[in-house]
């Protein structure tokens, strides 16, 4: 059975070979890298384009937006559209937005999504039907002092006190955006954190024909749906064209232990696959993994093959394309220079020296590739 992991994180100096090894280990034919925004160097876009080029056709990539524009909102409207055009000329297959995660809203002066400065961007990506993966909010218990998990609190993801965006405020902003642009091609990551509110999510699907979600963990997603597996299975079958497989596995420098990454990738892959394909899921606990030390023992969906095929690969291909777009070396070299200027700006804002090492490495790599042709 073909599988495409639609949600993988990556950053140099991790290697493309590690990603492909994880795809093989988790039974995936293809993967989609999703870029995050960076406090000091704007995005991971160049890292992803490099890995995509090296993958020989097995990787797609969704690039991130231009974070410098959040500090220059008078230039944001046209500037964001130009940025999207540039990254697609480089070979991007879609856009990743993590701007709805509360920690990112705190790190950057991101305007509310229904403000006028976003309007040209929303209109453009709707017209062009550009696929977007968008992380909005976090599990609702992260706003509740009595329910937030200890590991989330330790990660700085308790949002119930202090200057944090409220999750319902963000849902309202996105509802306003979708009302104005109902044909946006958005996949909300982590089931839009509405796994405990399937009726609410279903109404969004009914009103917005191109909105989808992916099943990337959060464990709460799987436990919530396991608690009423009959209703959850009916939801998946009813909205079988609107749900995408993804694991959220990460290949980033903060994960220095390669064996840990392999373990976590295997656990995430088994969890997501088994939940779709089996009627029971058992994952042994391991404190080095996403699940922690406790075993996970839940109900699975056991979806019909034709439904599972759509979730595992068909829906992603329909939205993104049957093959990854070609990486344009000349355009990537131009984008590297733009990213260096953004890095200089962001570093000055944070009061640190800029680090161009990734850009210098990729520039040399792509120049050598160009000269070899």
Image (cartoon, helix red, strand yellow):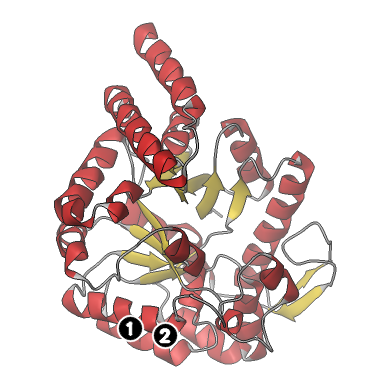
**Which one is in front, 181 or 152?**
152
Q: Position of residue 324 (x, y in %)?
A: 37, 40
Q: Position of residue 233 (x, y in %)?
A: 55, 84
In what element is the residue under mark 1?
A: helix
Residue 309: give its label.
none
Q: Which residue is mark 2?
A: 168
Give the residue at x 20% y 58%.
121
Q: Which residue is mark 1?
A: 172
- Left or right, 302 with respect to 133, comes to right
Answer few, some or many: residues within 10 Å of disc 2's Cα (few below 14, many 20 plus, some between 14 and 19): few
Q: How many marks?
A: 2
Residues at discs 1 and 2 in contact (Cβ within 8 Å): yes
- Left or right, 86 with respect to 260, comes to left
Seen in the picture, residue 225 relative to 120 is either above or below; the reply is: below
Give the residue at x 19% y 72%.
181
Quadrant location of the C terminus in the rendered image = top left
Give the residue at x 53% y 68%.
215
Q: In 3D space, how far apart are the residues under numbered discs 1 and 2 (Cα atoms)?
A: 6 Å
Seen in the picture, residue 357 relative to 368 is either above or below; the reply is: below
Give the residue at x 79% y 66%.
292
Q: Position of residue 4 (x, y in %)?
A: 50, 52
**Which one is in front, 78 or 326?**
78
């Amino acid at each position: 059975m073909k599988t495409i992991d639609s949600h993988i994180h990556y950053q140099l100096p991790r290697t493309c070979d590690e990603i492909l090894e994880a795809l093989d280990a988790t039974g995936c034919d293809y993967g989609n890298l999703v870029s995050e925004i960076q406090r000091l160097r704007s995005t991971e876009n160049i890292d992803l384009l490099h890995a995509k080029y090296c993958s020989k056709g097995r990787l797609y990539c969704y690039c991130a937006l231009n974070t410098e524009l959040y500090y220059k909102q008078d230039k944001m409207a046209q500037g964001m559209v130009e940025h999207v055009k540039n990254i697609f000329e480089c070979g991007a297959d879609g856009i990743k937005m993590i701007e709805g995660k509360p920690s990112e809203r705190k790190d950057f002066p991101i305007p509310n999504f229904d403000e006028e400065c976003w309007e040209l961007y929303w209109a453009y990506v709707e017209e062009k039907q550009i696929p977007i993966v968008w992380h909005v909010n976090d599990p609702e218990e992260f706003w509740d002092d009595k329910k937030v998990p200890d590991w989330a609190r330790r990660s700085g993801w308790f949002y119930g006190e202090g200057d944090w965006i409220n999750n319902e405020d963000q849902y309202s902003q996105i509802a306003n955006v979708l009302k104005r642009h109902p044909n946006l091609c958005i996949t909300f990551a982590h089931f839009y954190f509405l796994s405990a509110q399937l009726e609410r999510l279903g109404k969004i699907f009914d009103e917005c024909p191109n909105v989808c979600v992916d099943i990337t963990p959060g464990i709460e997603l799987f436990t919530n749906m396991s608690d009423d597996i009959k209703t959850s299975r009916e939801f998946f079958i009813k909205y079988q064209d609107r749900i995408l497989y993804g694991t959220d596995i990460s290949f980033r420098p903060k994960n220095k232990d390669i064996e840990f990454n392999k373990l976590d990738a295997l656990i995430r892959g088994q969890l997501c696959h088994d939940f779709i394909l089996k009627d029971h899921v058992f994952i042994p606990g391991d404190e080095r993994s996403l699940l922690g030390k406790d075993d996970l023992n839940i109900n699975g969906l056991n979806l019909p093959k034709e439904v599972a095929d759509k979730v595992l690969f068909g829906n992603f291909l329909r939205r993104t394309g049957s093959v990854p777009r070609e990486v344009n070396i000349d355009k990537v070299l131009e984008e590297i220079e733009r990213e260096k200027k953004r890095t200089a700006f962001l570093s000055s804002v944070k009061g640190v020296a800029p680090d161009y090492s990734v850009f210098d490495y990729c520039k040399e790599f792509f120049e050598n590739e160009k000269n070899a042709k």
